Image: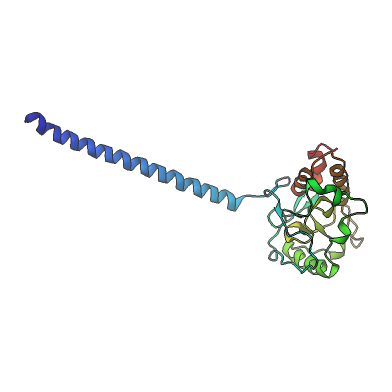
Amino acid sequence: MRRSALARPVLALASVLLAAAVAGCSHSTGSHSSSGDRASAGASAGSSQPAGDAAGPLAEGPGPQSHYAVAAQPAADSCHYRSDSGQPLPDATCTPGALSPAVTQANLASTICRKGGYTGGIRPPASVTDAEKRKNAASYGYTGQLHDAEYDHLVSLELGGDPNDPRNLWVEPPSPGHAAGAGPNNPKDAVETRLHTAVCGGQVTLAQAQEAIATDWFTAESRLGLK
C-alpha cells in the first residue's frame, strides 16, 4: 500500500515533465518554420540583380502571331538598368527574357538556321513596336533621345526569342562612346550574330546560347567558351 501511494505522485510528476517536453518540442518546431519563412520572404523581397545574375529559368512566350497588338509594359520608373563594364543590361525582373515555342533544338534547320532567313516574317510591325518603345522608355525612366536607343529583344529572334512578349523587349540605351543623335550604337547585335553562328554550327546548344545572352549579353561568349 505504501509503495502504491508513493508511485502515484512519481507518475504524476513524470506525466507533467513529459507534457512539458512535448510542448517544448512543438514550440521549437513552429518557431523554426516561422523563422525560415520570414527569412525566405525577406531574401526574395530584398534581393538585387547584379550584372551576370539571371532572374531564373526563361519563360515561354506566345510565339509568332499573325496579328500583333501593342503589349502592356511595366509601370513607369519601375525598371532599372544594370551595367557590365559600362555596357547596358536590362532589369532582370522587368526583362528576364522570353522564348518562342516555335523554335527548338530539334527544328533549328527549319527555323533560325534555315537558308533565306527566319526573322523577317515574324517581326511585329513598327506601328506596334513604336508604341511599345515609348511606353517601355517610361518603364525604364529613359530620358535620352529615342532615336539613339534600340527597342531590343533580349533573346534575339535569331536565337529563338519571343517576338513580342514584353518580358523579352527593352529600350536599350546606346553603349559608351556614342555620339548623341547618331542613332543606335549597339555592340550586342554582333554578339547575337556570333551566337547564332555557334548554335547553327553545333558549337553550343540553343538553350545554352539563350541562357547566356539573357543573363549578360556582354559576357555571353566568354561564358560559353567562344572567346
Residue 208 image point, x, y percent = 77, 43
Q: Is residue 207 left or right of residue 195?
A: left
- Against 11, residue 145 (above or below) is below
Query: Quick one: 133 or 124, which is closer to the camera?
Result: 124
Query: Quick one: 120 or 85, which is closer to the camera?
Result: 120
The answer to which quarter of the image holds residue 9 is top left
The answer to which quarter of the image holds residue 2 is top left
Q: Total number of numbered labels?
A: 0
Q: Which quadrant of the figure contains the N terminus? A: top left
Q: Which quadrant of the figure contains the C terminus? A: top right
Residue located at (78% from left, 39% from top): 223
Q: Residue furthest left?
A: 1
- Against 223, residue 164 (above or below) is below
The answer to which quarter of the image holds residue 19 is top left
Residue 112, visible in the rendered structure: no
Residue 101 image point, x, y percent = 75, 54
Residue 25, visible in the rendered structure: yes
Residue 75 image point, x, y percent = 68, 65
Residue 102 image point, x, y percent = 78, 55
Residue located at (84% from left, 43% from top): 199
- Against 142, residue 117 (above or below) is above
Q: How is the image coloured?
A: rainbow
Query: Quick one: 207 or 143, which is closer to the camera?
Result: 207
Residue located at (34% from left, 41% from top): 24
Q: Residue furthest top?
A: 3
- Against 71, residue 44 (above or below) is above
